[in-house]
Amino acid sequence: MNVADERTKSCWMEFPLPRRRALHGNMEADAVVIGSGIAGLSVAYELAARGRSVIVLDRGGIGSGMTARTTAHLASALDDFYSELIKSRDQSTARLLHESLAASIDRAEQICATEGFDCDFARLDGYLFLAPDTPREDLHSEFETCRGLGVAVVEQRGIPLGGMSNVPALRFARQARFHPLKYLAGLQEAILGRGGSLYANTCVTSVEELDGTVLVKTSEGHEVRARDAIVATNSPINDHVAVHTKQAPYRTYVVSGTIPHGSLADALYWDTLEAYHYVRLQPWSDRDDLIIVGGEDHKSGKADDGEERFGRLEQWARARIPQLKEITHRWSGQVLEPVDHCGFIGKNPGNDHVYMVSGDSGQGITNGIVGGMVIADLIATGANPWSEVYNPSRKVAGSLGEYLTENLGVAKNFAEYVTPGDIDSLEKLKPGEGGLYRKGLHKVAACRDANGVLHTRSASCTHMGCVVHWNSLEQCWDCPCHGSQFAPDGTALNGPAVTALADESKLAVEAG
């Protein structure tokens, strides 16, 4: 199981990915990749292309994780703004980051051409436009910063969205979009064609470096030995502190619907809100395109009002895209926000042969492709021009305020162990409802699944012990601290947790 088993389904999930079998014994390879989304398969592809033997493992179906819940913007414009990045890092870092993101789009285009992928890849413009009640100075500052970095950007008035013919905007050239699962399907075939192996429904429980090799163990008791291991699991499953304290999980929401083909310019669109709206098109049928609109982000586990957020997204979209017809899909996903605006790609802190890709922010597709290039270079030659930008061991002193704010949330979460529960009767729970109740000194996570079956599990996340919160939209438990997600029966769906929530019946009942 993984996040594909959550309730909402994206438009991409209608594309059938090849089914792969589970790992059935012990194996060896040059590299083992844990996670099969855009980051994991990009790393595996780049290593296989360099002649390395590669094994890919995933707890769910290959390619069915968080990448299937993205909107697949291929953007070299920075969603957190280059002007903000310079405040937390420096101008050189900003220039290198832009270079890497632009190169990732070029690499995707090159791979599509070389391998003959039919994944709807297209080059197009991206528009960053001023949202109501946001300072115009921020937009102009980003323009001046981008010009100083050599970014291809134009300041203009007006974008193709309805009623916005005079809105201030920046137009970024040579952005792109594609169908993410068609792209992953192509990567799968290319990896297999170079001798790689892909194993689904294989949950990795530990990654241990031993005398120049790495030993990976699975929940079924199998082992994979490799010279190098790459953890590409959205939120890393092998780290407890080093990176998790420097990023935070956020839920994001998406609606899609049909519009007449050709009725809106094919482009990427983003506004300047903090929890910004992001829009793109996708070819859908002979007569219609699909318009995809996302936003309404919040810290994971800190809100349970997904239906209301979908409503606000649809209202926002219809006000600006009057040709929007029926809503066809609604879904949510999770992004990891790094405190200094750069992802974490490279050697896992404290390791020589364990690598990681995380901190996708709102640019998981481009970051994942960058991850493939950076890690393959580090393994093959020990160097990459962008490695210091993404170094997971870097300090975050320039973002100390945000670092402290995000980690204060973790401390507040642990304080929930001494608060009352939010439900007082299991009998009152209806199908699809969940909440926390107290059992002695313990917090218990109780829910009734869609079939009305009652599940009671420990509310303590099996990663670091934070209190999980019920997500009625996705019918899962979310950990607000580091992004773990669990099915109603407690099964881990998303890292960093790899084991299920403990059985409530095994909790000791203390007095008090």
Image (cartoon, grey):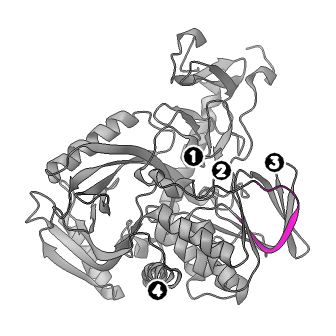
Give the mark, 2 or 3, whose residue is nearer the N terminus: 2
Which residue is labeled 2 in the image? 60
Task: Judge by depth and name the residue closer to the eye, 87 or 306.
Answer: 306
Give coordinates of residue 189: x percent, y percent. Answer: 61, 71
> Mark 1 and mark 4: span between their CA atoms?
37 Å
Which residue is labeled 1 in the image? 3
| Displayed quadrant of residue 5 | top right
**SS state under label 1:** helix
| Amino acid type, callout 4 | Ser
> Mark 3 and mark 1: span between their CA atoms?
18 Å
47 part of magenta stretch: no
**SS state under label 2:** loop
**Would you call the spot at circle 4 few (<14 residues within 10 Å), some (14-19), or many (20 or more)?**
few
| Amino acid type, callout 2 | Gly
What residue lies at 69% left-to-right and 34% top-to-bottom? 460
What residue lies at 39% left-to-right and 33% top-to-bottom? 305
| Amino acid type, callout 3 | Ser
> Mark 1 and mark 2: span between their CA atoms?
8 Å
Which residue is labeled 3 in the image? 219
**SS state under label 4:** helix
Which residue is labeled 4 in the image? 92
Q: Are marks 1 and 2 in contact (CB under 8 Å)?
A: yes
Q: Are marks 4 and 2 in contact (CB under 8 Å)?
A: no
Q: Which residues are magenta?
A: 22-33
What residue lies at 28% left-to-right and 55% top-to-bottom? 291
Give coordinates of residue 315: x percent, y percent. Answer: 21, 42
Give the mark, 3 or 1, whose residue is nearer the N terminus: 1
Q: Is residue 390 something that shows in the picture?
A: no
